[in-house]
Image (tube, grey):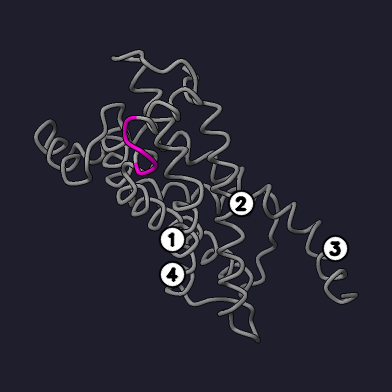
């Protein structure tokens, strides 16, 4: 049940660090100087840009190893550990083997981050404009809505990515063809229910914790910046 968990943890830490840093950097560069908000389109584009960065530097290689470990446990049983999987994949396919499924993963991350960060910040900007307090409950609810929106909008990319990053591996086009051959168009949304269970809670928890940490760190960073 926890096969590939250590790789998932490493990937998630890197992914969310890059995703929030990238989004906040882009948002601060393009936000309205008077209201401090972005238009819905710019919110989505900021999320998309940070999603691409996360895919390149963290998500694709860790997702490749995690997915290969899970698939290998069902069929081939070649991998003894995450590091053994890295060594074997590298020996067989070189560095690019660790980036198998890059196109599908990047599409998924770009659109997932666009919808997740975009939806959350659109809701937050709307609430700030209408003087709705940003409480823990509000943050959690906004994160949950963002998680639901993201899941339904990006599930096809997740299915393609998973098929591409199996132990045997496949190109993005091969993954699309096999999904269509196996289950038709509905196959692209296979696993939506299980993913919803994860994204609903992870979205609520992620943004709630982020807001609490940001509230603590922002004054410290501002003070250091002024002193510098």
* Mark linked to residue 45: 4
The residue under the point 47% across, 55% down is 116
- Per the image, the residue denoted by label 2 is 17
Do the residues bearing badges 3 and 4 touch, measured as CB atoms within 8 Å? Answer: no
The residue under the point 32% across, 30% down is 92
Q: Is residue 62 above or below residue 147?
A: above
Horizontal and vertical percent position of residue 210: 67, 52
Q: Which residues are magenta?
A: 92-96
- Per the image, the residue denoted by label 3 is 220
17 relative to 161 in the view: left or right? right
Q: Mark 4 and mark 2: span between their CA atoms?
A: 18 Å
Q: Mark 3 and mark 2: span between their CA atoms?
A: 18 Å
Secondary element under disc 3, as helix, strand or loop, is helix
Do the residues bearing badges 1 and 4 touch, measured as CB atoms within 8 Å? Answer: yes
First of labels 1, 3 by sequence position = 1
Q: Mark 2 and mark 1: span between their CA atoms?
A: 15 Å
Residue closest to the far right: 227
Horizontal and vertical percent position of residue 42: 46, 74
First of labels 4, 2 by sequence position = 2
Q: Is residue 141 above or below residue 48?
A: above
Q: Mark 1 and mark 4: span between their CA atoms?
A: 6 Å
32 relative to 174 in the view: left or right? right
Quarter of the figure with the C terminus: bottom right
Q: Mark 3 and mark 4: span between their CA atoms?
A: 29 Å
Report if residue 137 lies within the magenta region: no
- Per the image, the residue denoted by label 1 is 114
Secondary element under disc 4, as helix, strand or loop, is helix
First of labels 2, 1 by sequence position = 2
Secondary element under disc 1, as helix, strand or loop, is helix
First of labels 1, 4 by sequence position = 4
Horizontal and vertical percent position of residue 38: 53, 76
């Amino acid at each position: 049940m926890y096969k590939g968990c250590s790789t998932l943890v490493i990937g998630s830490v890197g992914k969310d660090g890059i995703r929030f840093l990238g989004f906040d950097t882009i948002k601060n560069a393009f936000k309205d100087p008077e209201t401090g908000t972005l238009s819905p389109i710019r919110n989505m584009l900021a999320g998309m840009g940070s999603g691409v960065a996360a895919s390149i530097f963290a998500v694709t290689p860790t997702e490749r190893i995690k997915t290969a470990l899970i698939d290998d446990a069902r069929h081939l049983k070649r991998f003894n550990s995450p590091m053994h999987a890295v060594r074997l994949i590298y020996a067989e396919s070189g560095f690019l083997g660790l980036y198998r499924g890059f196109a599908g993963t990047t599409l998924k991350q770009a659109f997932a981050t666009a919808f997740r960060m975009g939806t959350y910040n659109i809701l937050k900007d709307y609430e700030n404009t209408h003087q709705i307090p940003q409480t823990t409950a509000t943050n959690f609810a906004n994160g949950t809505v963002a998680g639901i929106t993201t899941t339904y909008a990006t599930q096809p990319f997740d299915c393609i990515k998973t098929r591409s990053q199996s132990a045997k591996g496949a190109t993005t086009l091969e993954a699309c063809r096999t999904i269509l051959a196996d289950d038709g168009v509905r196959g692209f949304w296979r696993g939506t229910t299980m993913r919803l269970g994860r994204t609903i809670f992870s979205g609520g928890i992620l943004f709630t914790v982020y807001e609490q940490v940001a509230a603590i760190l922002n004054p410290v960073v501002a003070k250091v910046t002024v002193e510098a």
